[in-house]
Image (cartoon, rainbow, N blue to C red):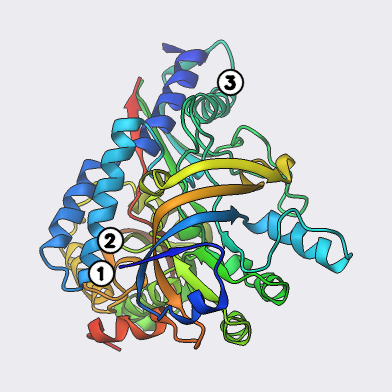
């Protein structure tokens, strides 16, 4: 189990291999479908972005509302493939890490290789457990989007698995073969 | 004629929505514990343990098991001798969903139009299925369903000549294409027969059947067992990281169909197979 901290520098990312389990600490940003659309529109129009993408990590999540006294509600990963249309543009502008769940397109894998980035998965369906690793949450942009707003999260020992490393190795492609018993 | 007050239905729907989203079905927990005894992958075992720990945290803190608290799918079985007082049944259900999702701190995931995508703010409208029966019973089931697994569901208009092999291929193709996206270990509902919309509804209803309760038809019960075995031989494993536990459970519901067709629908669910019922 590796302990890593954000921001994800190139040397941190180069040290991660598909299949590694890691505990992430530091600042990560939430964004899912609607926020990605706005981020890419802002880039296309040359507008400033709500946070610095350089070496940043985006977590694909739309949390439930916090109850009184809670930092955040349930906060597990959403399906990453819906962000495939936007992820290469963000990587071109410095994004280094993505946390979600589920397969990525070949275009995204190529982009991960080309920009020395990394894609990690958190456990889908473990939203209550994962919320305990989130120490602070602050909405920093697109508040009108509700659960889809961009939040700046401070996480400690957030558990994730490296799925696609900067060499383009993809755990989802390699891991099931060892357990497959039919065509 | 038996009377049921509008606000009783509203409050019941609200309670069922909150409970379904925060308390994992004990039969799912049992199935996960059972899967631990056969899972060969260390990573897979660790994930199954995480899901059990997550369930415990959710239950103890009344936090949703998963942040996708779903579209609220509601099944109503209403006796024709029942009269709803104080407002319409449909309004009571929508009001109950709004109340449950607001007071229970559940996520509001519904947009008013598929293209303009403006959130309705209270997770309404629900998707409601009515069944009218003789007598004065009133049974209501709230089955919130997340989109990660719903997006991976499929419908196949097979030819009769494709037979059981065609059904098997439809199920395996759906699970393979779902891969890691639907958060395995899965619960799978299969509908066979009827027509285009009927088989989709059968697949959804199959998800309501208690885990461990096979079809009452011995032939279909054997098919359910064989299909679950075949799914788990795919090796996808917990979260798609490889392993023996791709699905915890698979149920098939059937209906008579046309001489020229064999519709098959595969409704994929994650392990958070939510459904809570109440009789009023």
Vertical placement of residue A64 versus B255, above or below:
above
Mark 3–mark 2 distance (CA, rounded to whole Å):
45 Å
Q: CA distance from mark 3 to mark 1?
A: 50 Å
Is the residue B240 above or below the residue B48 in the image? below
Q: Assess whether mark 1 and mark 3 are in contact (beta carbons under 8 angstroms).
A: no
Left or right? Give the position of B76 relative to A139.
Answer: left
Q: Residue at x 18, y 62 (%)?
A: B221
Mark 3 element type: loop
| On screen, residue B271 above or below B224 | above
Packing grade of label 2 (10 A; few <14, some 14-19, many >=20) is many
Crowd tier of the residue under label 3, counting other residues whose Cα lies within 10 Å: few below 14, some 14–19, many 20 or above: few
Q: Confirm whether residue A130 shows in the render.
A: yes
Which sits earlier in the primary sequence, circle 3 or circle 2? Answer: 2
**Rendered residue at 26%/40% (across/down):** B56
Real-space Cα separation, disc 2 to disc 1, in angstroms: 6 Å
Residues at marks 2 and 1 touching, judged by CB atoms closer than 8 Å: yes
Specify the quadrant of the image occupied by residue B224: bottom left
For the N terminus of chain A, which image quadrant? bottom left
Q: Is residue B243 left or right of residue B114?
A: left
Residue that carries the numbered disc 2 in the rendered image = B47
Spot occupied by residue A95 in the image (x, y as percentages of width and height): 64, 69
Q: Nearer the viewer, residue A101 or B135?
A: A101
Is residue B209 visible in the rendered image? The answer is no
Residue B226 falls in image quadrant:
bottom left
Q: Nearer the viewer, residue B263 or B58?
A: B58
Instruction: Point out which mark residue B88 bears.
Output: 3
Label 1 SS:
helix
């Amino acid at each position: 189990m590796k302990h890593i901290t954000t921001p994800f520098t190139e040397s941190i990312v180069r040290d991660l291999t598909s299949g590694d389990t890691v505990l992430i600490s530091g600042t990560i940003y939430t964004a899912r479908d609607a926020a990605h659309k706005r981020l890419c529109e802002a880039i296309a129009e040359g507008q400033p972005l709500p946070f610095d993408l350089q070496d940043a990590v985006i977590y694909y999540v739309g949390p439930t509302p916090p109850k009184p006294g809670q930092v955040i509600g349930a906060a597990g990963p959403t399906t990453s493939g819906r962000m495939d249309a936007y992820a290469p543009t963000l990587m071109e502008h410095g994004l280094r890490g993505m946390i979600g769940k589920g397969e990525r397109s070949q275009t995204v894998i190529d982009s991960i290789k080309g920009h020395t980035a990394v894609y990690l998965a958190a456990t889908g369906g473990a939203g209550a457990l994962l919320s305990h690793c989130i120490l602070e949450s602050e909405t920093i942009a697109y508040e009108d989007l509700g659960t889809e707003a961009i939040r700046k999260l401070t996480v400690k020992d957030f558990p994730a698995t490296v799925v696609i490393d900067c060499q383009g190795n993809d755990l989802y492609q390699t891991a099931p073969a060892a357990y497959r018993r039919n065509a | 004629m038996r009377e049921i007050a509008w606000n009783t239905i509203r409050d019941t729907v609200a309670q069922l929505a909150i409970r379904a989203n925060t308390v994992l079905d004990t039969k799912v927990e049992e199935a996960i514990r059972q899967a631990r005894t056969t899972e060969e992958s260390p990573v897979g075992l660790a994930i199954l343990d995480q899901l059990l720990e997550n369930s415990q945290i959710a239950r103890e803190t009344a936090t949703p098991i998963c942040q996708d608290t779903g579209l609220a799918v509601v099944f109503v079985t209403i006796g024709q001798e029942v009269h709803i007082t104080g407002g319409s049944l449909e309004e009571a259900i929508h009001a109950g969903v709004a109340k449950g999702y607001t007071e229970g701190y559940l996520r509001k995931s519904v947009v008013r139009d598929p293209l303009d995508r403006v959130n309705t703010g209270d997770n309404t409208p629900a998707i409601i299925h009515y069944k009218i029966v003789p007598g004065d019973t009133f049974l209501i089931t709230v089955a919130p369903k997340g989109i990660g697994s719903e997006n991976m569901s499929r419908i196949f208009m097979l030819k009769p000549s494709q037979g059981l092999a065609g059904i098997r291929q439809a199920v395996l193709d759906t699970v393979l294409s779902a891969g890691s996206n639907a958060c395995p270990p899965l619960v799978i509902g299969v509908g066979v027969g009827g027509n285009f919309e009927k088989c989709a509804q059968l697949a959804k209803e199959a998800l309501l059947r208690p885990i461990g309760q096979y079809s009452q038809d011995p032939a279909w019960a054997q098919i359910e067992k064989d299909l679950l075995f075949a799914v788990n031989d795919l090796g996808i494993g917990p979260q798609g990281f490889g392993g023996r536990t791709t699905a915890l459970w698979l149920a098939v519901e059937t209906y008579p169909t046309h001489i020229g067709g064999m519709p098959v629908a595969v409704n994929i669910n994650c392990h958070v197979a939510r459904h809570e019922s109440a009789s009023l």
